[in-house]
Amino acid sequence: MRWGRAALLGLAALGVASGAAAAPFEDPAARTRVTTLENGLTILTLEDHTTPVVSLQIWARVGSGDEARFTGLAHLFEHMMFRGSAHLAKEVHSRLIEERGGQINAYTSRDETVYFTDITTEHLPLVIALEAERLANLDVSEESLADERQVVIEERRFRTEDSPEGRLFEALMATSFQAHPYRVPTIGWKSDLEKMSVAECRAFFDEYYAANNLVVSVAGDFDSEEVLALLAHQLGGLRRAEHIERNPTEEPEQSGERRAVVHFEVAGPIVAMAWHAPATGHADGDALDVASEILSSGRTSRLYRALVYDRPVALGASGGYWALARAGLFFAFAQVRPGASASEAESLLTREIERLRSEPVTEAEIEKAKRVLEVGLIVGQGSSHALASRIAEEWIAFGRVRPLEERLAAIRAVDVAAVQRVAQRWLAPTGRSVVQLLPPGEEGPR
Amino acid sequence: MRCVLALALVLGATGCAGAWPFTSPEWEKPPPLPVDAAVVQPGRLQRADLPNGVRVLVLEDRRLPAFTLGVVIARGAGVEATSEAGVASYTAELMERGAGARTALELAGVVDALGASLEVSASWDSISAQVAGLSQDRDVLFDLLADVVLRPRFDADEAERVRAESLAALRQAADDPGTLLSWSFAKALYAGHRYGLPESGTEETVARLGAASARAFHRRVFVPGAAIVFASGDVDPALLLERIRATYGAWQGSPPPDVGAAPKAPQQRRIVVVDRPDLGQAQIGVGHGGIPRSDPRRLAVQLLNSALGGGGFSSRLMARIRSEEGLTYGISSQFVQRHRAGPFAVFTFTRVPKVGEVITGILEELERIRREPPTAEELARVQSQRSGQFALALETSSEVAAALVDLEVYRLPRDSLDSYRGRVRAVTALQTAAVAQDLIDPARASIVVVGPAELLRPQLDPFGAVEVVQP
C-alpha cells in the first residue's frame, strides 16, 4: 500500500454523486522510468511490489503493415521466435517459462509484434536471459519453418477460414482499404504462407529486430537497478539499424460506398460497416470514442435499443473506433438473429449512424459515455501485464507515457458539438464499406 | 555472444561483466525455490457467517477507487431437471431485466449512467450476481444489487423477450464448430443426465420457459443457505459488513436443493461424427467420465493432467501433436470438476485429412501416461508449474476474492489457498501413477468429431463403430 492512499482520503466523504467524475488518484504509470541504451534499445520499468509477480514484454515496431512481398511474414516470424536458438532447442524457451508457472505468448498486429512473459518475480533473470538468447542467436532452419508453417496454416483455418467472424473481418478490411497495407490479414494469405522461405525470415529479422526498433517494458515486483543492469548486460550488445524500411503506401480518399458479400454456413447473418477514421493520437479520437460508447455501451445504448430491444432484429449490435498507427476505422456491426433480415439490420445501423450526424446527442448520453470511458481507464490498471502493455503502447505511439489525468481530461472535454462534428466529418455514407455475411444462396442487396 | 562481449567493455566497472558465458546460463541453473507468501495479507480479509447461513467475505484493497460486490449462489444448472434445462441461465438473464421499483431499462439506465456494470450469470455449479464500479457509487450499487438478488421482477414482457433472444442465441451458437463439439461431446457421454445437455439448455427446453419458471427457480435456489456475499476493492470493511448484515441477515428461505444425482458415463467407446460438410478443419474431442470437485485425489489429478495436456508446451500432448508433428494450433486436456463428476476430455482441431492421425496420437498418449506415468523429474516440473500459475492467477484482489468464493461454493477448507503450494509439493509420483491407472482409460474413451462425415468416416472406422449425426 505504498501509493494511492493519500489521494483517496477524500473519497469517503463524497457519498453518491451520479455522473460526477471520479475522484483523483495516483496514476501507477506515472512512476515509469525510461532508459535508453547506447544501441538505441528503450527500456521502460515500472515497479509495483503489491504481489510477487512481474510482466516483461518486448515490443518490436513491426507488424503486418510493414510486409512488402509475403503476407503473414511478421506473424509467421513471431512463431519462429519460439523455435530454437544456438543454445536452446525448439520450444524449450516456452517450456522453461511454463514449468515455472509463467505465462508466455506473443501476438502480432498491423503495427507491432509483442512478446510477453508473466511470471513470479524470482524467475525474472531467466526471462531476461532467454530473451537475450533468442534475440542474439535465433536459429531459423528449413525444418522448423516447415513445421511452424503448418501450425500457422491451422491457426488460419481456426481463426479465419472456418470462422464466420474471421471471414467477415478479412473481407471488411480488404474492402475498406484498397491500397494501404492494412488491407492484408495479419495472419497472411494461405498461398503466401505456403511459399515463405527461410531467407525471407532471416532478412525480416535482420531488418526489423534491431535494438533501436525494440522496446522492453517491465512492470511489477522487481528492483529497477538490478533489472536495468541485467538488461543492459544482456541486450546492450544487440545490433543497431541505421535505417528501417517502412511501407510508404497510404490509402487514397474513398469517394463512394463499397459493398461485398461473403457466403458462409451460418444460421444468423452478420452485417458490418466501416468508415475511414484517423490514426492514433488524432485530435478527433476522443470524440470518436465517446460516439462509440453512445452507440454501444450497455442496454441504454442506441444500437442495442434500435436493433435488439425495440425491434428484435439482432442478438447484438455495436460500433467502435479502432485507431492504428497509420490509419483508423470506425465500425458498426450487427449479429442478425436467425430468420431475421440482414437488410433490415443494415438499414437500422445506417439510420443510427445518420442520426449521430444529423441531430445532437443528449447531455445525458454524453455524460454516460464519458463516465464509461473514465471507469474503463481507471479499472484497467489492475495487473502487471496491463501496466506493462499500457506503458509500451503509449511509448511507441506518443514517445511518452501519457498521464491518466491527461487522458481523463481529454475525454471530459468532449461535448455535444464535438460528437456531431466528428460524426459528420468521418461517418459520411460515401466513405463507408459494407460487408454482409450470409448463408449460401442468400443474395445481398444490389 | 556479441552482446555479452561488447557489454563486458561497457559495464566493466559495474561488476556485471564476465558473469556469463563463463558461468552457466540462467536456464541451466536449478530454479529458485518458490516463495510461500501468504495469499491474503493479514488484516485485509474480513469474514462473517450470518445466523441464516449467508457467508460473507470482504477483501479490502484501496489502490484504485473502484470495487466489486456480489452474491454467489452455490447452485447452478446442475440442479435443473433435464426437462427445464437452461432455466438457471434464463433466470439469471431475467434478473438483469428489472428489479425492485425499476423496469429493465430503468435498471440499465442507473448502471450505465455510473459507468458501472451489473452481471448475473449462471454456470453448472453456481449463479453469480455482481456489480462493479467506482467506489463513490457504492451505496447506489449496493441497493441495486440487493434489489436484483432479493426482489427481481420477472416481468412478463421481458420474460418473452429473453426467451426469444435465448432461442436465437442457441441457433446462432450452433454455427460455431467448437461450440457444436462441446455440446455433442457432452451428449455422447451423458445422454439422459443434465450434464448431457448444453448449460444454457436446448431449443426444446428453452421454448417452454417463461416468467413463472424463472420465479420458481429463483425461489428454489436463491436461499440464504446457498449464498455467499463478497466484496473486493476500495471498501470500508466494517461499514460494509454492517450493511450486508442489515440487508441479507433477515433473508429467509428453504434449505438449498440437493446438487443432483451423479452421472454415469458410458463404459464402452462411442464414436460420433457431427456432419458439417463445409468445414476444412475438424474439431475433435476424446474422453470419458472424470471426478467431482470434492474428490480427495484432485491435486494429484491436476498434476497428472498438467503433464499430459494441461500444461501448455510442457505437456506431452502439445509436445507431440503441435511441436513435433505440426498437426494443430492447440491441444489440451482437462478434468472438468463440478459438484458431480464432469468429463475428462482432450480437445483439439486439425485439417480434415489428418483427423485419424491425431486421434491415434491422442489415444497413444493416454495409454502411455498409464504405462509410463510422470517421472519424478516430470512431476517436479509440473509441481513448480502449478505453484507458479497459482501465484500468477491471484495477482489482483478481484482474482483472490473469486478464488475464496469458489472455495465456499464447494465447501472446501477456507485455508486452501494458503496451504495450496505445500499440498502440491506433497503429491508423490506414486499418487500420480495411481490416478493415471484409475482415471484414464483410452479403451473406453469416446471420440466425437465435427466435420465432413464423408471424409471422416474412413479415418474413424478403425477405432470402432461410427455414428453420424446432423448438427
Image (tube, coloured by chain):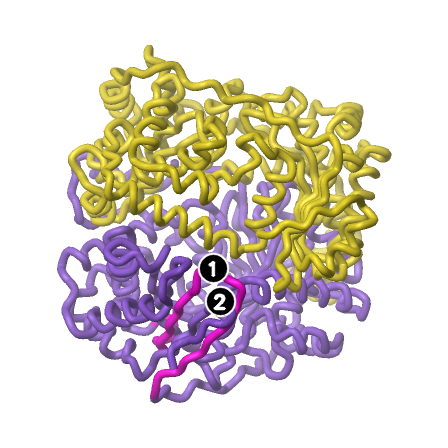
- Secondary structure category for the residue under label 1: loop
**Helix, strand or loop at mark 2:** loop
Label 2 Cα crowd, 10 Å radius (few <14 / some 14-19 / many 20+): some
Residue drawn at x 37%, y 55% as measured from the top left: A315
- For the point 24% across and 29% down, which residue is it? B151
Residue A267's label in the rendered image is: 1
Q: Is residue B9 visible?
A: no
Residue A192 rendering spot, x and y as whole percentages? 66, 77
Magenta segment boundaries in residue numbering = A256-281
**Depth order, front residue of B126/A188:** B126
- Cβ–Cβ under 8 Å for marks 1 and 2: yes
> Chain letter of disc 2?
A
Does the magenta segment cover residue A116? Answer: no
Q: Residue B21's spot in the image, x, y percent? A: 77, 55
**Are dots 1 and 2 on a single chain?**
yes
Q: Position of residue B368 (x, y in %)?
A: 83, 38
Q: Is residue A259 magenta?
A: yes
**Is A139 displayed left or right of A360 in the figure?**
right
Residue at image point 85% right, 35% down: B372
Give the percent coordinates (x, y) of residue A307: 29, 60
Q: Colour of chain A?
A: purple
Residue at image mark 2: A439
Q: In the figure, what tint was chain B given?
A: yellow
Seen as rendered, the residue at the extreme right is B371
What kind of residue is marked 2? Answer: Pro
The tag earlier along the polypeptide, 1 or 2, is 1
